[in-house]
Amino acid sequence: MNEGPEDFTCPQCKSRYRLVRVKPGPRTTNRPVHCIVCGHPLAPRDGEDVLKYLLISRSKVERPA
């Protein structure tokens, strides 16, 4: 398993994120996660890990109304 952050690109709009894997806490919920630029669904977990997406570069695509 990779211990540090990884680069991730939204497959729909190509916005760039820093992807961080963390262990779930006692209050962790299983909520959907979406790209904040285009709304494309992103994986909320990978196995036991919770995935956190930190936007580092916004694409030119705007989120649909």
Image: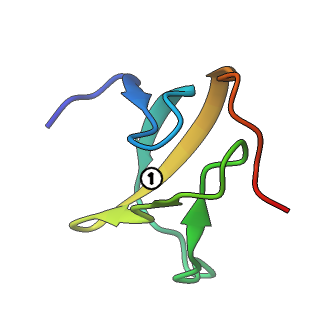
Q: Looking at this view, is 5 or 39 the one in front?
A: 39
In this picture, is 15 found above or below 52? above
Q: Residue at x 36, y 65 (%)?
A: 45
In this picture, is 59 found above or below 44? above
Q: Looking at this view, is 30 or 17 the one in front?
A: 17
Q: Quadrant of residue 31?
A: bottom right
According to the picture, the residue beneath numbered tag 1 turns out to be: 51
User: Residue type at mark 1?
Assistant: Leu
Quarter of the image where the C terminus is located: bottom right
Q: Residue at x 63, y 81 (%)?
A: 27
Instruction: Indicate left or right for 1 with 30 as reference.
Output: left
In this picture, is 36 found above or below 29? above
Q: Residues within 10 Å of mark 1 (few under 14, many from 20)?
A: some
Instruction: Indicate left or right for 28 with 51 as reference.
Output: right
Report x, y in % for residue 52. 54, 47
Report x, y in % for residue 58. 69, 23
Q: Quadrant of residue 28?
A: bottom right
